[in-house]
Amino acid sequence: MPEGDTIHSAARRVGAALVGQEIVAIETPQARHRLDRWPQRLAGRAVRSVDAHGKHLLVRFEGDLTVHSHLRMGGSWRVYRHGERWRRSPRRAWLIIRTPEHEVVQFDGPVLELMTDGRTRSDLRLAALGPDVLAPELDEADYLRRLREDDPTRAVGDALLDQRNLAGVGNVWKSEGCYLAKIDPWRTLSRVSDDEVLAVVRGVRPLMRASVDRGGRVETYRPAGQSRSPGRERRTWVYGRGGLPCRACSTEIRARGQGDDNRTTYWCPSCQS
């Protein structure tokens, strides 16, 4: 599932293409959106801003209307110049916004809806979100309060995936964050100090911001003297490296499903003991 860095990167690209530009046409190829008359409702409205909060992207139009998107596992936002070949089939397009220079396309949108600005503030899917991990100034007190109000027997790795605690962290950054903070992701919240859970978020924030600048490409580890990763080798400390030796101590990286959704957690049993 795309995590906060991917969504913030998409918001940056989409915003650069839409904000302040003339909207020439809006197309909604999927039947359910055609029935909602999106093109007619958005006709003549300029885009005010494109924002991200956690894994949610919001295209805000003039006149109190916002397109809300959550990509789940397979969705994506793409920006093309007119005449540029699309990388996905047009049949998978859910929303197309055209300007004189660009086509902004949302593909495979499991959550794509038009709502009022007021509803974006009251809808529980958005209103219940924790602080955005990529906010310019993270509200650390709110983050700590939410974790401490969670079930104290819950594993910290599972709690970090709960978007009500911290919005934008997914499986990649949960695993990498716990490794960087040297926290066993299976420890319960009752056995993790405030300083330790703050170390997780403070460790991943600069790396996630760098990922936004790279278009959402994750890189937490780079070998000394190497500027490019050979082949498809992951540039992570633990994520996706189950069964391989730890880059720091050579202990075999472990991988196991965690939480109600059984999301795979990666960790080094030595470095994170």
Image: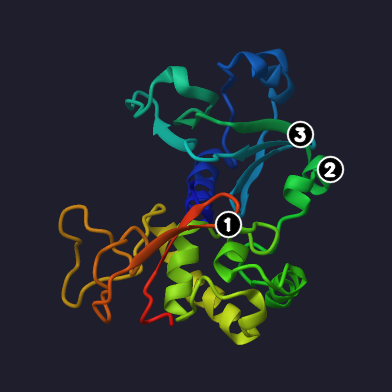
| Snapshot quadrant of residue 116 | top right
- Report which residue position mark 3 lands on: 115
Total marks in image = 3
Between the C-alphas of marks 2 and 1, the distance is 33 Å
Q: Does 213 appear above or below 191?
A: above
Q: Which residue is mark 2?
A: 118
Label 3 or label 1, whichever comes before in sequence order:
3
Judged from the image, the secondary structure of the residue bearing numbered disc 2 is helix
Inspect the image, locate mark 2, and give the three-letter code of the amino acid beneath it.
Gly
Q: Residues within 10 Å of mark 2 (few under 14, many from 20)?
A: few
- Circles 2 and 3, Cβ within 8 Å, touching? The answer is no
Circle 1 SS class: loop
* Residue 177 locus on image (x, y percent): 47, 71
Going 26% across and 75% down the picture, which residue do you hit?
247
For mark 3, give the secondary structure: strand
Disc marking residue 259: 1
Q: Is residue 119 left or right of residue 32?
A: right
Closest to the camera, between mark 2 and mark 1, is 1
